Image (spheres, rainbow, N blue to C red):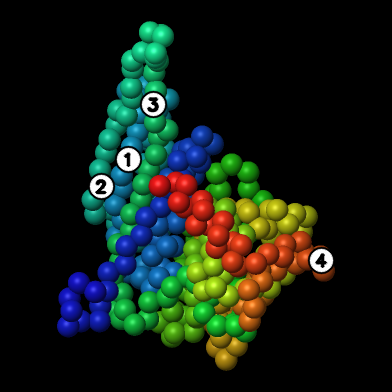
Amino acid sequence: KPVLNSNKGVVLSSALYPSYGDVNMYDMAACAIDTAIRNTIVAGGTLNHLALLDNFCWCSSNDPKRLYQLKEAVKACYDCAVAYGTPFISGKDSMFNDFKGYDEKGNPVAISIPPTLLISGISVMQDINKTVSPEFKNAGDIIYLLGETKEESGAPKVDLEKNLKTYQALEKVIRKELIASAMSVTSGGLGIALAKAAVGGMLGCTVDLKNIICGSLASADIKLFSESQGRILVSVSPKNAKLFEKLMRKIIYAKIGKVGNNSKVVIIESGKKIIGTDIKKLHSIYHKFSNSQK
């Protein structure tokens, strides 16, 4: 809230997927852009007042292969920005992140960073009181997954047309204050998003994977850990569910479970419980990992 006598707010987000570049550089860039935009929208930002910034951290940019990869990433930036109507307003380029030297035995070594594109998003929302946070809020709320889960290996593909419709629909229900929580599904897929939403609110949940929109032969692993783009995990009060579903009727979505009134996270597949764990355990694991990264 930069202007204290106004309820307008600024929403900031960022995203990057350097490992996707090992598979396809265009998809790596597209996923970063799509996620930065999605992260902004789930918090309450708007597409019609959203801009992007790029930060290219590259290596060996005079090498033909690296230069081609850079061209593919820039092409993705153009395609996504035009499709979403989100201009790039600034950025930074660091093109030669390479080291040549010697190891402890005097042998020559060459080290280069993986080509990486960091995308940041900035948006303005008209009323910060309508900001949506990612954690589960109330026992009994219905859990939905917006978007389609795909069985994708390597770097996911971004469906610009479908995702745009999803983000526009989400904007509408946020303006109408119909959802209790919203989380962008990113690295680690739905399984990680569910864990984070549960730990954030210290509320359990029960989710049935059978309702997820996915290939008919998709395994539970795919449903839980696919990193397909354009997906959002939301929770909705039962009193708002009918209107929410009406407004979502033109996009792909699935009702997958409920927020619990206990501390258990339960995942069901084909009528069988395949995951049953405790939020305190997840909380402990999360903070143990976070502390180990410092």
Closest to the camera, between mark 3 and mark 2, is: 3
Residue under numbered circle 1:
56
Residue under numbered circle 4:
272
At which x and y percent is residue 52?
A: 31, 56
Q: Nearer the viewer, residue 110 or 56?
A: 110
Residue under numbered circle 3:
112
In the depicted structure, whether residue 110 falls above or below residue 247: above
How far apart are the alpha carbons under marks 1 and 2?
8 Å
Q: Is residue 216 left or right of residue 66?
A: right
At which x and y percent is residue 291?
A: 45, 51
Are discs 4 and 3 less than 8 Å apart at CB?
no
Q: State the residue at coordinates (60%, 88%).
A: 238
Q: Quadrant of the N terminus?
A: bottom left
Residue under numbered circle 2:
91
In the depicted structure, whether residue 137 falls above or below residue 30: below
| SS under mark 4 | strand
Are discs 1 and 2 less than 8 Å apart at CB?
yes
Q: State the residue at coordinates (57%, 70%).
A: 198
| SS under mark 3 | strand
Q: Nearer the viewer, residue 260 or 56?
A: 260
Q: Earlier in the sequence, mark 4 or mark 2?
A: 2
How far apart are the alpha carbons under marks 1 and 4?
46 Å
Q: Amino acid at mark 1?
A: Phe
